[in-house]
Image: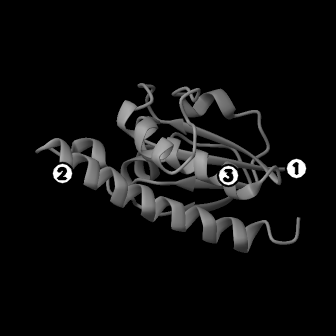
Amino acid sequence: MTNILVLCTGNSCRSQMSEGYLRHFAKGKATVYSAGVKKTFVNPRAIAIMQEDGIDISEHTSNLVDEYFDIPFSHIITVCDHAKETCPYFPTEATKLHHNFFDPSHVEGSEEEITSAFRKTREEIKEFCREFVLKTLKHQ
C-alpha cells in the first residue's frame, strides 16, 4: 500500500484540504495522512469550503509530524515553505515533493474576500492533488 504524508505548519487548512483531495482522487489506492510541525485545529472555513466541493473533512484532526515516524511513507508532500524549512528530521526514504500554496487563513477583509481566498487555494490544491494521483498512482 502506498502511504502519503502531507505536511504543513499547523495542519489546519492546506494540508487538511490536500489530505481530503488525495483520498478522494486515490480512491483507496493510497493511505493518506496529514500533519504539522505544530498542532492546532482543523480550520472551520477549510471544512466549509471543502464541503462546497463535496469533500467532507469534518472528522479530520490536527496531528503532529512525530506521530507518524513509524509509518513507511512512499511520498511526503510539504504544502508550505515554513513546513519544508522547519520540519524536524524525518527518517524516511520517501519521495519528497514541495508546493507552496497560499495560506487563505491569513486573509483579512470581508467574508466574501476571505471565502474567495479559500476557494482559490482549494482549487489550486485540487488540481495539484489530481495531477499527483494521476502521475503517481496510475499503475496501482
Tag 1: amino acid:
Met
| Residue 81 location, quadrant | bottom left
First along the sequence among labels 1 and 2? 1
Secondary structure under the numbered disc 2 in the rendered image: helix
Ranked by sequence position, the earlier of labels 3 and 2 is 3
Counting residues from the N terminus, which is met first, the one under dot 3 or under dot 1? Answer: 1
- Residue 22 to residue 8: above or below: below
3D distance between C-alphas at marks 3 and 1: 16 Å
Q: What is the crowding at mark 2: few (fewer than 14 residues within 10 Å), some, or many (at least 20)?
A: few
Disc 3 versus disc 1: nearer the observer = 3
Residue drawn 28% across the image and 42% down it? 105
Q: Quadrant of the C terminus?
A: bottom right
Amino acid type, residue under disc 2 in the picture: Glu
Q: Is residue 20 toward the left or the right of residue 45 in the image?
A: right
Residue highlighted by disc 3: 24
Q: Which mark is residue 1?
A: 1
| Helix, strand or loop status at disc 1 | loop
Q: Which residue is mark 2?
A: 113
Q: Nearer the viewer, residue 53 or 92?
A: 53
10 Å neighbourhood of mark 1: few (<14), some, or many (≥20)? few
Q: What residue is shown at x 34% (from left), y 60% (from top)?
A: 120
